[in-house]
Image (tube, rainbow, N blue to C red):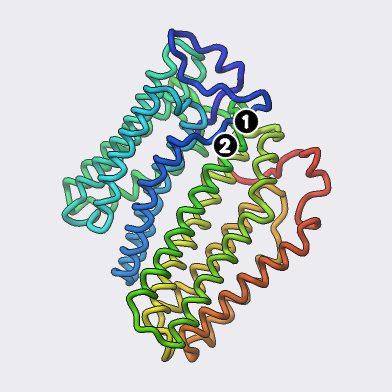
Amino acid sequence: MTAPPSPRHAAATRGPAPLLRRPDPHGHAKVSFVELFFDLVFVFAVTQLSHTLIGHFSLHGVLQTAFLMLAVWWVWVFTSWVTNWLDPERIPVRVGLFTIMLLGLLMSAALPQAFEDRALMFAGSYAAIQLGRTLFFLWAVRGGDPTLARNFHRIGVWLGFTAVLWIVGAIDETWRVPLWITALAIEYLGPSMGFFVPGLGRSTTSDWSVSGGHLAERCALFVIIALGESLLVTGATFAAEPLTPLGVAAFLVSFAGSLAMWWLYFDTTNEFASGRIAHSHDPGRLARLAYTYMHLPIVAGIIVNAAADEFVLAHPGGHTDLKTAVCLLGGVGLYVTGVGLFKRAVMGRWPWSHGVAVAGLALAGLVVPSWPPVATSAFVCAVLVALAAWERHSRAACLPPDSAGMADEPSIGP
């Protein structure tokens, strides 16, 4: 993944209307209203993913939904890196974002039938976004820093190759799954391999300069989008079901669980992470690890938990069936693991409180089948609340002692 330019890069851009961001005197790049408007498409995408998981909960359905979530995340995070670089307040950049919005809306609409009747609609929209955004960036920085241009030439080669795989897979149903898996795997490997192209070389993260505050805020907003979907599922399902004491209890527990998820992510880590990146000796590498990769399990865990809320609210009594147990324990376990990995990336240490929570959730899988779903949901909520309280209480110990000075970043990751 590329990263936004330093002021030196911005100054190097030539032309009548430079489209690169101009950071404020403190080096911060503010999230614009255009970017917030852009995110609305992904509210719809997350809704489509959660409903697809709910409606097709089987091993096959779970794997397909996971694949689609990886694709949606990759479109969004690539675009967020580009807007970390380009100024969304400039008209050409706005037009580019609006075009991606239209294509993203088509892609999101196709998600439930992406592997069936709407494969070409999904793959064509996805490939057009990925390759078109890269070509637009090359046009936007024409005549500027040659290092920056070479970086996006490399990305264009990678995405041009995968675009062929996406389209051929959409046309040929027999080869669809292997071609699409190959295409997405190549794209996910690209940033960690510096988008190496023979004759063009590879990018190195030491050359990247990133606005940590902007990227942290963008990813935090996506977490909000996912949590918002969880609340929408809770409210819509509760409204559609008969009003019973068990239903009210399930509703309150689901809401409390969403609050605890919010608290765990936003109370102790997010603000520190942006400062850590801003003062890092290799901000591109740290941002790539912490935001491009480590936010995936966070978002995935929230989406799975939204499906769990639907299952519990629809059937709060009786015994906890397999799909409800998997979504409740697995969704929250995935989320807690993701937050722990994020903290490991930016703080240099794995919070052992998260390990205790994940172990507790795993052990609970042995006994929850005999519990009512509302009781299983209450247990999971209690784990989240206890973990959030633990992290809040130990916040000073959670942050490195040199956090004010932002010492060397942890030497982990790709």
Up the image or down, 2 lies above or below 345; here it is above
Read off the residue under disc 1.
Answer: 28
- SS class of the residue under badge 1? loop
- Residue at left 59%, top 80%? 363
Say which residue appears at 62% left-offset and 74% top-offset. Answer: 383
Q: Which mark is residue 214?
A: 2
Three-letter code, disc 2? His
85 relative to 69, above or below: above
Left or right, 381 with reference to 41: right
Is 211 or 70 nearer to us in this picture?
211
Along the horizontal axis of the image, is 143 left or right of 343?
A: left
Residue 96: image x %, image y %?
Answer: 35, 29
Residue shown at 56%/43% (left/top)? Answer: 217
Q: Position of residue 261 (x, y in %)?
A: 57, 63
Mark 2 and mark 1 in contact (Cβ < 8 Å)? Answer: yes
For the residues labelled 1 and 2, the Cα–Cα distance comes to 7 Å
What percent of the width, then of the height, locates residue 281?
A: 70, 32
Q: Secondary structure at mark 2?
A: helix
Residue drawn at the location 67% of the way across and 72% of the way down: 386
- Residues 393 and 53: in front is 393
